[in-house]
Amino acid sequence: MQLHVSYNMKKRLFIGSSSEELGTAKLVKSVLEKDFDVVIWNESIWDKSIFKINNNFLSDLLTATLKFDFGILIGTPDDKLEYRGEEKLSARDNVLFELGLFTGRLGLEKCAFLIEESVKVPSDLGGITLAIFNNRTLADKINCIKQMFLNAGNIELNFFPSSTLAHAYYENFVKYVCEHYVKNNGFIYKGTNYSDCKLKIIIPYKLPNDLNLAFKRIQNEIGVDKLSFSANGRPRNVYVDAQVIDGKLILLDFPTTLTGIDYAISNHLPKDFKNQTKDYNLIIERELNKFIETLNKILVKNDFERFVDISRI
């Protein structure tokens, strides 16, 4: 059975604005779509649409915060308000609400408020990245936001919930396999010491209802035996699947901890989980990719990346 890796995807970016400023939103998208998969709030293509027919708007927005890596909210002078006896121009309430929603879910470094210079800035927005623009500076501000997002995407880990699972999986299993390999210059398997080894971690493309059964089917197709070894800090032996290919010992593991992603989605989005909607499938794919991305970063940090391969199947 052939294994291969496929998890390089553009980060997804949400743009919110008032109806009157869709032109600005489209301009922002045109600048950023080379580097990101950009969706404007009003796009009606079903696969990308934020607001679905017959759905609750708030529910759709909450779902959207799970589907995107970054958010840009555009504040333009759409409303007038009286502030301390003076008339001020203000962004729409729904734009400010969406800014708070995305900031709370994604974090400060993954959201930006692109705000026209005549708009009054609410005092509660202290600490949020404000890109104040006029007609001459709009392009520069968009590029500043792009660079911030590209940097954040390279260094920041999202802890809902895939990154947390990746950390726990590494600490409870992968670390022990890697440390045993280094300390013992390999593994003893069926009486033979193998110094030429590789740990292959297999990630499914989808999460079936019974992940254990699905992995068991793959194990049967591949044909593996069990290898065990003791590890410091573990009261019981560590078990891993093994096979020898062309004189090289291949250790295989199937992280059943991934079921935690399904569990989290079922709690946050029970309707999408129950009906296996396109939004559900998109979120699953994003979280699986984040699991892989986080695990790769941990492996690089600990200098184990040459020993471990992560494959999709």
Image: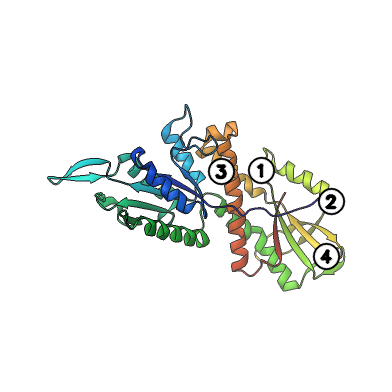
Q: Mark 1 points at which residue?
A: 206
User: Tags 1 and 2 in contact by the CB under 8 Å rule?
Assistant: no
Q: Name the residue under label 2.
A: 223
Residue at 42%, 33% in the rendered image = 57
Instruction: Label 3: state its secondary structure.
Output: helix
Q: Is there a contact, CB below 8 Å, between mark 1 and mark 4?
A: no
Upstream in sequence: badge 2 or badge 3: 2
Residue furthest left in the image: 85
Measured Cα–Cα span from mark 4 to mark 3: 37 Å
Q: Is mark 4 on a helix, strand or loop?
A: strand
- What residue is shown with label 4? 248
Question: Which quadrant holds residue 206?
Answer: top right
Q: Distance between the residues labelled 1 and 4?
A: 29 Å
Give the image location of residue 199, x and y in percent: 73, 61
Which-is-in-front pick, marks 4 and 3? 3
Spatial separation of the CA atoms under disc 2 and disc 3? 32 Å
The disc, 1 or 2, on the residue closer to the chain's N-terminal end is 1
